[in-house]
Image (cartoon, rainbow, N blue to C red):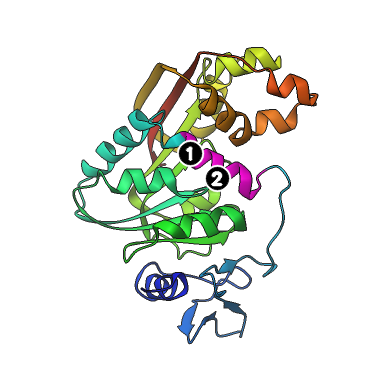
Amino acid sequence: MVSKKEKSKLFLQNGFEYICPICSNNLIFKNDTMICENRHNFDISKKGIICLLNTGKFKTNHIYDKNLFIHRRRFINNGFYDELYKNIACIINNYTKSNISIIDLGCGEGKIDNCIIEELNKDYCFLGIDYNKDAVNLALDYEKENIGFIVSDVNNLPIKNNSVDIILNVLSPYYSEEIKRVLRKEGLFIKVIPEKKYLIELRNILGFDDYEKTNLLKRKLEKNFEILQEIDIDKKHKISKEQIQDLQVMTPLIKSKKLKDKDNKNIDIDSITINLKILVMRRK
């Protein structure tokens, strides 16, 4: 069986065109290291993880921990986001180019990315990027010849200018200038944002306001991107007690709200609403 480290090495050698996150010079692969002409080097760990950050060091996030991503994967496995990834795959399949490069900014544990590529009917090279080491470590479960994952920063992408066909960003932070820099002229930026009713049942119990930022987010995006298409997803799903537990752990809403243990355990809902908007854009 090929190790995660060997899979990572193969992908990094044959996938994208990488640049140094410190000096922006081209990175080349040498033994178990990526190195630039200024001798900045980035090693692949035994687990197959490479950290392409300008600090060269992993950072710990106490909200987005390994446990959150494990429960997130389990929750997604129940089909709550099927409509989302099938719509994204359809957009990619309809893209005019046949052999495409795809990056997911904020890929998490990689489950949605794996669901998307299973629906693709064209050749692709797919890179998932996340700032969280635990997430990338889990995502490497899906790594194969044409999909890989790295630790990096959406504000400082280690990717060559004008070299990517499609950039995904699902409910995660992004940086417009970096997306514009690495996206090809005719490339697509696919951004998924929460609509008003997203997880409304859970939000109501926790005392959070509804999401009402859609128009504000769109105006912000339109400063740098032309919106070509909008797809709305609005579906209520039945939810079991076990799935509620997964949802409680996977969402940062719980950890950002100071709840007593008994309050956390008493969350009782029988359905959950997935209300999202997919924006398909091109850079201006």
The picture places residue 241, in percent across and down from the top left corner, at: 54, 22
**Quadrant of the image occupied by residue 245:** top right
The residue located at (54%, 70%) in the rendering is 47
Q: Amino acid at mark 2?
A: Ile
Do the residues bearing badges 1 and 2 touch, measured as CB atoms within 8 Å? Answer: yes
Which residue position holds label 1?
A: 74
The residue located at (22%, 43%) in the rendering is 93
**Quadrant of the image occupied by residue 266:** top right
Q: Amino acid at mark 1?
A: Arg
The answer to whether residue 74 is magenta is yes
Q: CA distance from mark 1 to mark 2?
A: 6 Å
**Residue 70 got which mark?**
2
- Provide the major secondary structure of the magenta segment: helix
The residue located at (55%, 85%) in the rendering is 37
SS of the residue under disc 2: helix
The magenta-colored residue range is 64-75
